[in-house]
Image: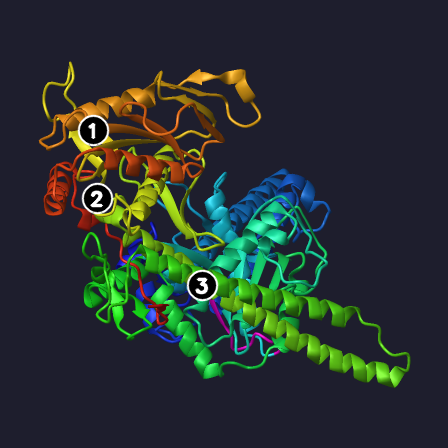
Amino acid sequence: MDAKDRSCGLNAHVECYRCGAVVSPSELRKEKRPHRCAECGARLDEDGFDEQARKLLVHKEYLKARASLWGLCAEAAISPLVSKGPLSRVHSLETYLVSRARHRRTSLLAKVDRLEKEIQALAYSRYFSGKWFLEGNVPLQRGQNQGITPFYTLQKGYELRPPAKNTCERGVIGEFEVIERFRREAISPQSFLFGSRILHNLYVPCLNMGQDDCFHEADIIVVTTRCLFVIEVKHKRTKVNCTFPKTTRTYGADAVVGKVVSAALRQADQSAEALTAWCKEYPPENVLRMAVFVNPTKFTTNASSFRNRRFVGSCPCDWKKTLTAMEQEFRLHDECLSPEKVNVLADSLQTKLGSMRDVRMALTARREREGARPVFICRKCGTRLGWDDLQGEEEAGASCICGAPLNDAALDGFARQITQEIKHLDHIAQGCAAKVAKEESALLPSLPWRRHVEALRRHEQVRQLRKEEQHARANAAELQCGLRRLAQLRYYGSAWFARTGITLERAEDEYKYHITPFYGERGTFHLDYQWGDVQAESIAAEFRVFEVLCQALATSGSPLRGSVLLPNLYLPRVERGFPGTNVREQVDCVLLTPSCAFVIEVMRRPANILADALTRTVLADGGEGKGLSDVRLLGYPLVAVARHAAQFTLVDTPYSVNSTHEVLVFVDPCSFETTGAGFVGNLYIGCVPQGEQALVEALEKRSRMKKSVLSHDALFALGKRLLATYGTAQGVEVGEHVKKITDGDSGLRLTA
């Protein structure tokens, strides 16, 4: 018994119903179907066990009927073998007949119990010998929870019984029921799915998302010669109402009315997009999405066929309609694969993506084998570049061997090109959709024969326009996936990550957060986070201020050019009660110039801010819609920036107290007003993004007013020393946090 068999939580074995020989499921995986017993040659697959169970069930019902008859005889104190007459009135004979009837009934019920145990053993053996377990390795029991119970009934055949109040196991049973129906269709010569391969529970890595540990689980995949069906199964005892839009334009899963339906279609879309990179034999328009609801209390839909490559059906009530819709869509597409290639592709998908553990091990082996994998291709010289190539000098940044820059500005320019191309493809798709609507709404000629010819011509033209529209949208979706991967590269290749080591996700301690980098419609780089994630909100705000200052430092002719920007310094806290240096406090950002130093505190407050640097007061109301009904005095940010500036003056630097300035920056306030422009004493209060220009101008003006105390080389050496001494972000090496991004067969090309 191998590890896969032991992982099921029960003693997984298959017992032959004819000779009693015990076979391990691992031995059945090595054989070709149909599996047979080595001792007696009995079939050890679904059909063999179902046929034997049907015989035992019929025999059990016969024995139960006889036992019931003998029970009636015992109650009536008569025997069916003796007719009514003088002998039946004899007391001794009556006692004998009653005892005999009870004995027969007891022996028959004992046989029924033995048959039930045999049938139950057949149900377990059928589960462990079926394709569902051999290919998916889905256990009957997970942990200490009550597991799934397989059983046979004469009316419904083979079924799985879920434990009480366990929605996860109910989902597994729903997938099993749909798989069984597809399996019967795949072995029926009259079905259009004959010879197709049915796969389930494939874990597809999101290679185009830039993460090795992110997976999309595809519930069921039907691999055919013409198209690929990606099916999401939901087992919900609720009312399901599916309403597709009446428009002929292309739309997504969110346009389908019904919260449960749109969520299921969205999951099917994600699995289909992830599978497109693995099944390149199929065009994007041949990858179809489906959502199947198992045993809903009520199911209604306004579509009897696929709409925009999507379909929603139910099982078992509307199963025939679901198969009819699949067959209609199947006939519309041309043949892409031969039956032999279908088996090759299915075996490849099952081997590579059949188990999440196997997928993770394969990706780990690939990382160790390839080392620093290439992440994009330089268009100027064609050199394949990796993560190590993104690390360059502090000022110039990384560059290719041909001289093409690989800094943040180059990646942002490349993202702007991608966004423009996506907009162009969307414009083409919208134009094709408009032409399709015009062709479909055009009036046909009045003559019958001309009407028939014109209908055929328009049908072919509409079909061609729809193919062009789907092709444009598929290319736009592929570019969008590449843009998300580029956003990952942009973050992990930035100076922010090189100096802080803050990853996009952290889940090992109480400071959990999750950040998503993305490019906006205009190619602007942002960090997104979930509402309520305070840690991610703080990191995104600090990153935004850091990006603004980096752009100012890179501007030619600026007094800040050549300065050093240090984010997230951990300075020793020296106050009453904190006499030692073991207690450190995070300083959001420190800007070192040849003449002075700026200690910057960042705060995100979505409220109306009224600041007065002269009196060192900051007022904030409740935000939009509340006005001045909830005005609060924000004293903590001013106290924090003053304390951080005092802590910085105690560090061994050539800056004096008068050369250390305090800067308080609010990120994304609803509105911001300040009574004074520029620095008031050593304090400046500003905001981002409304006051980015004013912030940079104030820093430039103050740096001009002071006399230089450091040369460029000395300033650079001071920055390196401070970063090495106080820049250990979470007390671990930055290299341990670097997340590698898997490079698929297609690489992004960087414009020089």
Q: Is residue 526 left or right of residue 321?
A: left
State the extent of the magenta-drawn residues as a range: 190-201
* Identity of the residue drawn at 60% across and 74% down: 468
Magenta run includes residue 198? yes
Spot occupied by residue 51 in the image (x, y as percentages of width and height): 52, 67
Instruction: Mark 2 or mark 3: name the one nearer the start of the chain.
Output: 3
Circle number at residue 418:
3
* Identity of the residue drawn at 41% across and 62% down: 482
Circle number at residue 324:
none
Quadrant of the image occupied by residue 432: bottom right
> Residue 14 or 726: which is nearer the viewer?
726
Q: Is residue 82 left or right of residue 657?
A: right
Spot occupied by residue 613 in the image (x, y as percentages of width and height): 35, 21
Disc 1 from disc 2: Cα separation: 15 Å
Spot occupied by residue 258 in the image (x, y as percentages of width and height): 64, 47
User: Mark 1 — residue?
Assistant: 660
Q: Amino acid at mark 2?
A: Ser
User: Mark 2 — residue?
Assistant: 563
Instruction: Mark 1 or mark 3: name the one nearer the start of the chain.
Output: 3
> Residue 236 or 444: which is nearer the viewer?
444
Spot occupied by residue 715 in the image (x, y as percentages of width and height): 13, 42
Quadrant of the image occupied by residue 636: top left
Does 730 appear above or below 100? above
> Residue 51 or 720: which is nearer the viewer?
720
Q: Amino acid at mark 3?
A: Ile
Q: Secondary structure at mark 1?
A: strand
Q: What coloring was used for the rendering?
A: rainbow
Quadrant of the image occupied by residue 473: bottom right
For the N terminus, the quadrant is bottom left
Q: Is residue 666 left or right of residue 706?
A: right
